[in-house]
Every structure is written in structure tokens, then in C-alpha cells.
Image (spheres, coloured by chain):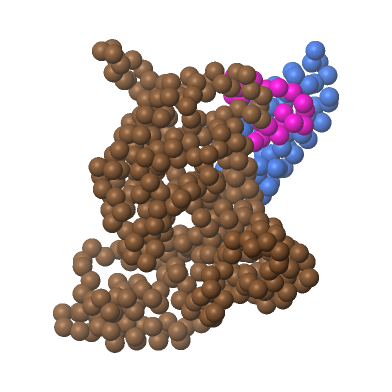
Amino acid sequence: MAQFVMPQLGADMSAGKLLRWRKKVGDRVKRGDIIADVETDKADIEVEVFNAGVIDKILVQPGERVPVGTPLAIISEEGEAEKASVSPEALAGPPPAAPPAPVLPPVIPLRTVRLHISPAARKLATDHGIDPAAITGSGPGGRITLEDVQRAVQAKAAQPAPEAEVDRQTRMRQAIAAAMARSKREIPHYYLSTTIDMNRAMAWIAQANLKRSVEERLVYGVLLLKAVALALRETPELNSVWSDGKAIPSADVHVGVAISLRGGGLVAPALHHTDRQSLDELMKNFRDLVQRARAGSLRSSELGDPTITVTSLGEQGVETVFGIIYPPQVALVGFGKLVERPWSFEGQIVSRPVITATLSADHRVSDGHRGGLFLAAIERKLQAPDTL
Amino acid sequence: MTKEKIRETILRALGQIAPEADLAQIKPNLRFRDQLDIDSMDMLNFIIAIHKELKIEIPEADYPKLLTLDDCMEYLASRKGPEAK
């Protein structure tokens, strides 16, 4: 017996609305089957099931919006033991009361002054999704006391939940604001940057594409993704997730790709096992992922488990992007626009296509030295495109 | 293939990559990416859709000839139109 719960599809999701069931009571399901469609603040997601079995009971009806972790259905297991997605604790108890990513007020006030607040008061505020900076302190020197926070919590509880009629755009902005504010609040970022000669990579692609039909042609973006994935093997600590005060290295490399959505906002679904895919597979899957992201048909596994994010803002014409880490990940790689620049090569100044790669990384997990080695490994791999 | 059929094919391919776009409002001489909020990956998917529907190979060097509706019409007419060889 396993509970199928409302999954957390990214740090910026605290609740989801069940749109429709794709299966009914009595239906047999296997790992990876799409069982339901769920609406999040960002997109409509096809939710996959992780257990094999038969649907025993449906607990939440279409149209209901429930917090992450709420049981949606009961699946009775049978046959071979599949890897259970539901932990014993989740089976034993009610859904966690506090969603992991509290949705903050849409506007995060910018404060440059240091807040006077006790750790206990700060924790209480954070647990309830309240920005401490928005609380007026009544203690000595404007210090925010535990009582101040308790009052703010009560005031928040008294307000009607800001449900329903907020449009998707607004909710997406709020979700991004919550995740990014949390990232900047909790993660001590450091940033590195390097310029990479793309001459060999571009020449290799042009040559490779001559032999390929329209559908099989590669874009240089897939070389970047593969180079990042392979470089992570040399600095595996950057391919971790932060959980309970420590970094847990991920056995698999699932590179999340930041994809901007028409009309605003973005999602960063994963290309699973990026390091093990051939360039052809990556290209096909990348293309498919972008199309589905923009059409709003992503799958739950793609949003739930990226282990690092790559953002490529070259399209907009900027040369450098310093991104904000997407919790619980601990690193983000940025690529700017591919530009022709003067480049010194064997004592000559030549014109070369170059790209600026940046790393935003979590200083709790890695240092600039290791981050530098990682960027250097990306550069080295891009100089040998035939090995990607 | 008539010009009208080619035009329909182009619009159908655009509809696949930008389902929310109002295709009736497309300005024929403005680049798709400047009026539909699409990027290079969308353009690639657009070209692949054209390739599949019309069953023609489109060399990478010809991609710049497919940036506007007018350009697409002209290029595809030369490849698939009544006067195509």
C-alpha cells in the first residue's frame, strides 16, 4: 500500500490543483505512468507515478487545490517491489503542515540595514512564510521580538488566503519571487566567470551538421550542456542538493535547463542523465523539452529533480549572466551570447567565436578554487568536441 | 503546390510552436521572432515542422531565408511551388 501524494515540483511550489485523473479506481499503473494532471503556479504538469500497483482509492477530486505532500490516492502494491517513492514517515503521518517553500508576499522589500531579530523569531517568521523585514519591531532599538512575529503570524492567519482569481502570470511571479528570495536569503553565493574559445566546437558542429538532415542537426547549446554534465564528474560536490543543513551529492546528473516562457516567467526542467546521453539524444530531448515547456506539458519527474541548472541568455544579446541558484541545488551555470572577439592564438591576434561561462555556487558547499576547476573542465571539454 | 497551400502549411507549423499566437495578425514582412516571442529553438522546431510537412531537406545555410512569412512563401514556392523544378 502506498500513498500517491501531491509532489513538490520545484522549490517554488507549495501547493497544486488537481486538474484531472488519467486513471480510475481499479486501474493498474506502473512506474512512470502519467496518473494525473496538476496545475501549479507555473504550468500544468503531467504527474507520473513511482509505484507499480492498482489504484485503490482516490482521495482528492479534480478542482481541489491541496498543499504539497497531501495524499491524492492510495495505490496497493503488488508484484515485484518497485522503488517506493513514498517514505515510511509519509505513510505514517499526516502531510507536512508547513510547505517547504513558503510563498512570500509578492513584493520582497529591499533592506540594506541589518535586521535586529533573534534567531528564534527569525525561524518562526520563516516557518510561516513571513519576511522578517516586513515586521515592525517593538523591542529595544526596533528589535523584532518573538511576540512581534507571533502577532504577524496571527494577522496573516486572519487574512483570507489569496486564492483563486489571481492569474497565472501573477502567481508565477510570486512563485519565482519566493524561490529566489529564499535562495538569496539562505545561500551564500559566490560567482566566477571565464571566456571560452568556441572555435573548435563551432567548426565541429558545422561539419557534423553537413551530414545531418534537418531533424538531426545539432545546436551548440547541446555541446554546452554535455560539457557541463561531464565536468560535474570532476567536481561532484557542485552536483548536490542541500538538505537538512548539509549537501548531499547526487549520484545522477540531471541538468535543469532554464526555459523562458512566452509572455514571461521561466521553468527549469531536467534533462535526465545528461552526462550519459549522446549528443543526438540530448538534442532530440532538449528540443522536445523546450517545445513541451512552452506548450505547458511538462512531466513531474522533469521538474522535481534537477541537480544543477544551466541558463543561457545569449538569445537576448547579453554576454554574461550571473544567475541565482535554484534551491535545493547548490550551483548554476550561465552562458551568454556567442560573439566574435579578438583572441590571442599562438602569438597572433585572430577573430574567434567566444562565449562567457559563469558559475554561481553555494559557498557552504564549495570554494572558488573548486568552482574554478569546474569552469576550467567545461572549457577543456569544449576544446575536444568530438569527445562530448 | 499552390501558394495558398504553402501559406497554410507555414501557419500550421507556426501554430504548433506558438499555440497562443493569433496567426491572422501576422505581419508578412516582419521577422517571426519579433512578433511572436519565439527563440532559436522555436525556429528550429518550426523549420523541422515545415520539413516534415513538405518533405523537403532544408540546408542550414538556408535558415536565414525563413525568418518572415514573405521570405518563407518565396523560399518554399521556389522549392515546392508550381514553378518549382
A161 sits to left or right of A146: right
Q: Tell me: A136 left or right of B74.
A: left
Q: Is residue B37 above or below residue A100?
A: above
| Picture coordinates of residue A91, whole percent (x, y) | 57, 76
Identify the residue shown where x is 28% and y is 43%.
A370
Residue at 68 percent across and 61 percent down: it is: A80
Residue A245: give x, y in percent of width and height.
33, 65
> Quarter holding the N terminus of chain A?
bottom right
Q: Which residues are magenta?
A: B45-65
Residue closer to the observer: B14 or A325: A325
The spot of residue B72 in percent (x, y) is 68, 27
Query: Which quarter of the figure has residue B69?
Result: top right
Q: Is residue A8 left or right of residue A32?
A: left
Does the image show residue A264? no
Between residue A155 and residue A355, name the one nearer to us: A355
Q: Quadrant of residue A85?
A: bottom right
- Is residue A333 at all visible to an observer of this figure? yes
Chain identifier, colour blue: B
Magenta stretch, main secondary structure, is helix
Residue at screen point 62% across, 72% down: A3
Residue at the spot 61% in from the left edge and 53% down from the top edge: A298
